[in-house]
Image: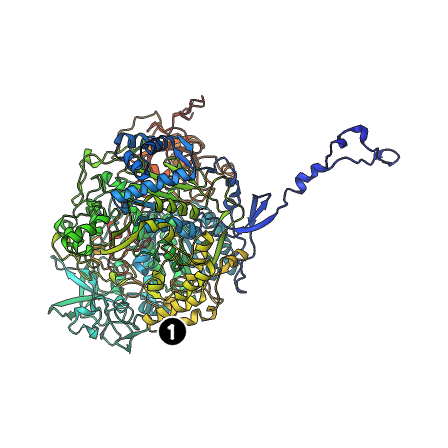
Amino acid sequence: MSKLLDRFRYFKQKGDTFADGHGQVMYTNRDWEDSYRQRWQFDKIVRSTHGVNCTGSCSWKIYVKNGLVTWETQQTDYPRTRPDLPNHEPRGCPRGASYSWYLYSANRLKYPLVRKRLIELWREALSRHSDPVLAWESIMNDPQKCQSYKQVRGHGGFIRSNWKELNQLIAAANVWTIKTYGPDRVAGFSPIPAMSMVSYAAGTRYLSLLGGTCLSFYDWYCDLPPASPMTWGEQTDVPESADWYNSAYIIAWGSNVPQTRTPDAHFFTEVRYKGTKTIAITPDYSEVAKLCDQWLAPKQGTDSALAMAMGHVILKEFHLDNPSDYFLNYCRRYTDMPMLVLLDERADGSYVPGRMMRASDLVDGLGEANNPEWKTVALNSTGELVAPNGSIGFRWGEKGKWNLEPVAAGVETELSLSLLGQHDDVAGVAFPYFGGNENPHFRSVRQEPVLVRQLPVKRLDLADGSERMVVSVYDLVLANYGLDRGLDDCHSANNYNDVKAYTPAWGEQITGVPRRHIETIAREFAETAHKTHGRSMIILGAGVNHWYHMDMNYRGMINMLVFCGCVGQTGGGWAHYVGQEKLRPQTGWLPLAFALDWNRPPRQMNSTSFFYNHASQWRYEKLTAQELLSPLADPAKFSGHLIDFNVRAKRMGWLPSAPQLNLNPLSVKASADKAGLSAADYTVQALKSGAIRFACEQPDSGHNHPRNLFVWRSNLLGSSGKGHEYMLKYLLGTDSGIQGEALGSSEGIKPEEVEWQSAAIEGKLDLLVTLDFRMSSTCLFSDIVLPTATWYEKDDMNTSDMHPFIHPLSAAVDPAWESKSDWEIYKGIASVFSEVCVGHLGQETDVVLHPLQHDSPAELAQPFDILDWRKGECELIPGKTAPNIVVVERDYPATYERFTSLGPLLDKLGNGGKGIAWNTQDEVDFLGKLNYTKHDGPAKGRPRIDTALDASEVILALAPETNGQVAVKAWQALGEMTGREHTHLAINKEDEKIRFRDIQAQPRKIISSPTWSGLESEHVSYNAGYTNVHELIPWRTLSGRQQLYQDHAWMRAFGESLVAYRPPIDTRSVSEMREIPPNGFPEKALNFLTPHQKWGIHSTYSENLLMLTLSRGGPIVWISEADARELGIEDNDWIEAFNANGALTARAVVSQRVPPGMTMMYHAQERIMNIPGSEVTGMRGGIHNSVTRVCPKPTHMIGGYAQLAYGFNYYGTVGSNRDEFIMIRKMKNINWLDDEGRDQVQEAKK
């Protein structure tokens, strides 16, 4: 009703008076009160979460009013915990509470965008060619046209387009690339599927149906700890945060719990009320230190030295001086310490530890006919040699003995840990020592590079007629830590004050931590574990894992836990928290994500190797393999550049490669038919003759690099892209800030396995397509930007390692403007692709090179020596000495039909994961009834997957974690291998089947599954390794136990068969860069660290107005007060950081919490907010990765060897960055590069 008349005084009713006329009753309009009365009204609440890779996986209430999201608050209806455990809520953080700002902000992507120069070329080409594929070809065949749009990437110039036009362009580019170069030249990058698993699957399903390359992320992010696969054969498995509450002693080592695990931090504080002692170990005074009883501040990068010094104390006091029966029994049953190692003799008469002894080394093979060369050997308490159950040789080729029962050859037996007391002799065994390597920025303790220690040994007659000495792993470990065994060992320590590796006194000199603190904390940690049977825990953070020798850091800490029997015990163990890696319904998701229901195997690639190669970062490599070798190794056997080791690993099948061959893999079948051979046999012959070569051997030939790249759910160029400037120059072909010289203009080592071209190709990518809901740094450099739905506008699912629940992302409102969900976007591209490819691609035969996979019989490839077929040392045998060569039939016109339906391979081959498989016919039938089936076409009769909700139901139905019937089948399948009954772990949940609407109603706890090593139980919190210890399921390693000794030939050659302190490497990024003109201010080299920030999750939220308001409103770099005084820098000054890799600009945060010599730039601060130009490069300032470059480690390239075998995101080269140094100085000229008169000059400090 109109209130117009109420505004006129004439029509107003005179009010009554009161209080003798001093007061008057008014009848004024009070509609203004509606603004605050209705402020918190809403139409509905919808449950959703944030797919941001924060590990929180928190359930949120999304409030909708008039069709718009107005705000969000935390849900508080998580299923209750048991009575002795606090509940999970409250879960949430300020970053999540600000997400709704994005939906309607200026930074929201509203329409499909395309680079103007590219779309003009496309429209002009289409006007001349009616076939879109020929139109794209005409652009690609004109180098000037290609350069015209590539060189302006990152310069702006986007215009609005529409879905129809851009889908056609993308599809045409994909078809032409596949037809001309091969499907493996089409690649896609998206990280951490657990945060929005259907959205991830949308892109990889499309790529996998094409035969495209899916790039890994966990290793590239440097979140993958290689020490976990090395020790347990497990990518990562960790306790849920609730298990912290069960712990009696916690060390937070490099993990800033309240800042980076905000929703879980309450467990950390609550357990202190029970008397649990908490220790913080961080180089800076971080927020976690406030929550702890004691703070240790080791020099950054020296964590393994500190861990080994603590390990020295634990071994001496609890294994030698006052042995703990619990510790010794745990090590005997659940570790490789009883296993025997052959000793190899050196020229000087000393010995070096060789490989582990196998049953095949003995005359009778200990009666083991199946895989005796993969069955480890130990000495039992009666002095007999035995091959105990559980080693990897029992996993494949036979059933019923792959378990950790104390049995060998069917007889119960107790293994001996040490040979001392039953030894035949004492031998001098040589160990490498790296702690004396000099580095101007890190302390060293000079000792001999080879330490010969005295060990008890036994002499054995082998099957080849030789006599060899053997030693136990336990004795090797004790000697490696410098423990005195009374064997007249001059390199062993007499007491803790001896400055010998690895005593507390030695640790103090390396790390700066007082020896008394090292001794006390190690003693308390072990004493607690002894009394509680393993309830001591180490919470680790990514900061410790981001160093080049991250595996040494982690193995030092893992050893502490193993020595104390903590792994697999409630409240104890290894708690490594980084990205949201735990995709709990993994086995249900895999067929959907990689189209395993239609084609097997998919093409998957290790991203670190991919970007090291194709961004030409290897051309600037200054580190050599010879610098990394053990002083005990023969350098002549390990010559070449780091990329040579990568190439050798690829051709031996250890690592994947992409692109794979120097020709189109779709063309191999035709050549094979002419030769009268199968495609696989022809490929073998051609590789041996050199007619076909691996693409990685000729990276700059013009045919052997990626052409099309999809990026979704990721900010590749603004967050994870180590070597950012190299990507700009070589992948994108645009301006870069590289300040170093390539090998062509220096005296660096040139590759042996890779053809050197004096000029590298720039602008390798013909098309970069990014899907995002906001304009990120990656979007700025893309050719096409497609607007995606936000986390409140689509249906999806989310899980985390921090809690046992599965959460939905829900479409509280429809996608705003013209945005679409990831599933709908890729479905649309697939539809157009199926139309456009007709006449160019039909039913094609693709030849896929598949690496030797972990959790498959291929991990039993070469048991002893490394033989290279290219060098004539062995035959090229696919699946043994080279990659598997697999023929895959593709039906390109049926891509859309296959994308939107569940394929027949699940009926035929079933499903499974981690080496076990089960029948899925019931689940497929159920999905046909639930989602309905296709009525016609190539997928007739198959269950439909039309929508993201359909895709969610596929995952839930197929996964043992969400379908109790499948869980029981999975445990039965494992039981056939172990010979033990495991179904009791899930039988009570057999009838439980979680559906998408169930998790929208309330978070649901998952069901225990053999995919994981912990239990979801009313009686115990999830803890990794629990089923290994309590169900006697072997770890997936060579010995079947926790593997402390890594006996692969490369591990021994690089001095890492046992843990050792290895100081940070010298990347020479500061010492070998171009001369930079001075600006009048002093400069200093500082170690550059990139921890996770407080006001963002990776790059998300970093430009969110609410978070910018709470922080400093732009990029910042933290430096110490001492370094700031030396450089004349005051708090909030503009500074510049630069090295050979590039430059960045930021404001300085001067703080006493940062130690001298170190600087921190919190990870992934976007380059799109408040960044002036660089004095060094003359361009806009850059990001944190502008000063980094990838440097791969050869030992991470090993494959085909038990636990050291490739798996997607499981093992492979890792993108470390914390060994980098930068030059830092105050900026003089602040140039905003916008001609708006805001430039300024910073004066020197008065």
Instruction: Name the quadrant containing residue 1025.
Output: bottom left
Say if 1208 sits above or below 26 in the image. Answer: below
What is the tally of numbered marks visible in this picture? 1
Q: Is residue 1025 above or below residue 618?
A: below
Percent of width and height locating residue 315: 32, 62
- Residue 388 percent across, percent down from the top left: 27, 71
Q: Which residue is mark 1?
A: 981
Q: Nearer the viewer, residue 462 or 1087?
A: 462
Is residue 910 positioned above or below 609 on the image? Answer: below
Tell me the crowding category of disc 1: few under 14, some 14 to 19, or many 20 or more residues within 10 angstroms, Cα based.
some
Nearest the viewer among 1150 and 206 is 206
Give the image location of residue 1036, x and y in percent.
31, 63
Give coordinates of residue 1174: x percent, y percent: 36, 29
Residue 569, placed above or below residue 1235: below
The C terminus, quarter of image: top left
Camera-side residue of 30 and 887: 887
Image-based side of 374 in relation to 83, left or right:
left
Q: Is residue 712 visible?
A: yes
Where, quadrant-wise, is the N terminus in this rendering?
top right
- Disc 1 marks which amino acid? Glu
Q: Is residue 632 visible?
A: no
Image coloring type: rainbow
Left or right placement of residue 729 versus residue 805 in this view: left
SS state under label 1: loop
